[in-house]
Image (cartoon, grey):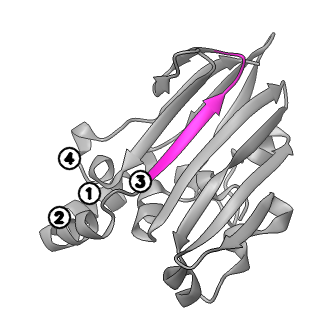
Amino acid sequence: MRAIFLCLPAAALLAACIEMDMTVEVLGEDEARVTGVIQMQRQAFEMTGGDESFCAEEDGGTLEMTETHARCIIDKTGTFAEVMPSEASGDTPAEMQGELVYLGGDRVRAFLPLTGMEDELDEMAEDPAMLAMMRQMLAGMSISFTMKGREIESSTGTISEDGTSATITLGVDDLIAPAAERPGDFETILRF
């Protein structure tokens, strides 16, 4: 899986009917914990051959199967590079790399580029039938990313009332909106 929530464009996740709610908590100057849930319809999971990379144990995943869903429960603690890869690899497209950067003191910059998927979205937006199908098929589905620390200094996401986390949630309408209305990159400066 290799931090799948940061390795795949959000459009690809929604197109694959995958829902996600992931949190990265910064614990120190080079330590973070990623927790959350990634799930897809069981039928879609079985159609892909039950690919183990969807929820690899070595990546902190525990696979749970229900009658309707394949659910991967994630809980992994590691270095910034292990939790949020910043360089392209076989599993990480260059346009969709996450990044945690220690800024000194007790401050960290978290960055998740969302604008890297614009070409793919613009291509889909040119096909009205595809847009209509996506809206119907993905109604109610979302992808949510949360950055957590002792204190959020600033964020392009929504900061919680207690000031300890920032979240961005993307639904199908966010992703297929005209380019000028799509969410920008998710960037957060926090203290651990």
Task: Sort mark 1 into few (<14), some (14-19) or many (20+) by Cα contacts within 10 Å.
Answer: some
- Answer whether labels 3 and 4 touch (C-beta < 8 Å): no
Dividing the image into 4 quarters, which one contains the N terminus?
A: bottom right
Residue on which the image places disc 4? 178
The residue positioned 40% from the left and 46% from the top of the image is 170
Task: Sort mark 2 into few (<14), some (14-19) or many (20+) by Cα contacts within 10 Å.
Answer: few
- Answer whether labels 1 and 4 touch (C-beta < 8 Å): no
Q: Mark 2: which amino acid?
A: Glu
| Residue 129 sits above or below residue 173 on the image | below
- Answer whether labels 1 and 2 touch (C-beta < 8 Å): yes
- Answer whether labels 3 and 2 touch (C-beta < 8 Å): no
Secondary-structure class at tag 4: loop
* Residue 102 x, y percent position in the rendering: 76, 23
Magenta-colored span: 142-151
Instruction: Point out the residue furthest to the left here.
Output: 128
Residue on which the image places disc 1? 122
Residue on which the image places disc 2? 126
Q: Mark 1: which amino acid?
A: Asp
Q: How far apart are marks 3 and 1 (CA)?
A: 9 Å
- The first of marks 1 and 4 along the sequence is 1
177 vs 164, left or right, is left
Q: Mark 4: which amino acid?
A: Pro
Dividing the image into 4 quarters, which one contains the C terminus?
A: top right
Task: Sort mark 4 into few (<14), some (14-19) or many (20+) by Cα contacts within 10 Å.
Answer: few
The residue positioned 67% from the left and 64% from the top of the image is 72
Task: Sort mark 3 into few (<14), some (14-19) or many (20+) by Cα contacts within 10 Å.
Answer: some
Q: How far apart are marks 3 and 2 (CA)?
A: 15 Å
Residue on which the image places disc 3? 117
Task: Confirm whether residue 84 shows in the render.
Answer: no
| Residue 115 sits above or below residue 163 on the image | below
Q: Is 67 inside the magenta-drawn segment?
A: no
- The first of marks 4 and 2 along the sequence is 2
